[in-house]
Image (cartoon, grey):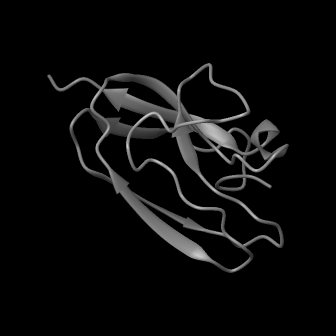
Amino acid sequence: MRYGGQTPGPVLKVRAGQRVRLVLENRDQLQHDLWVVGPEERAPYLDPAFPGARTRILGPGEREEIRFVPDRPGRYRYVCTVPGHDATMYGEFLVEAVP
């Protein structure tokens, strides 16, 4: 269970105010989701860092696309919030300030 076949997953870099499109395709036999959360946030996850920055829980073979606008520069994480999965399914989501 990994994003991009590695732990941590690849760093995703965007600019503050840029519209982001993420697609999660569950190619595993277990349920998974994807949330963008604060850098220190740990389970239980209550809210994503930005409105719309989470998928629903996807079953095997399901796919979901989300779109959102990260409006605050900083370092965030993307994680699978299914209990126990965030130990290996996470990565850095870097929101850079607009120059």
Residues 8 and 33: in front is: 33
Q: Locate residue 27 relative to residue 17 in the image: left or right.
A: right
Say if 19 sits above or below 26 in the image: above
Q: Locate residue 92 relative to residue 84 in the image: left or right.
A: left
Write down the quadrant of residue 18 in the picture: top left
- x 53%, y 26%: residue: 38
* Quadrant, the C terminus: top left
The image position of residue 20, as x and y in percent, is 32, 51
- x 53%, y 37%: residue: 47
* Quadrant, the N terminus: bottom right
Say if 75 sits above or below 3 in the image: above
The image position of residue 23, as x and y in percent, is 48, 64
Numbered circles on residues, count:
0
The image position of residue 97, as x and y in percent, is 24, 23
User: What is the residue that sits farthest to the left in this orientation?
Assistant: 99
- x 42%, y 60%: residue: 66
Say if 80 sits above or below 24 in the image: above
The image position of residue 79, as x and y in percent, is 64, 42
Residues 96 and 72: in front is: 72
User: What is the residue that sits farthest to the bottom in this orientation?
Assistant: 61
- x 72%, y 73%: residue: 59
Write down the quadrant of residue 86 in the picture: top right
Q: Locate residue 18 relative to residue 11 in the image: left or right.
A: left
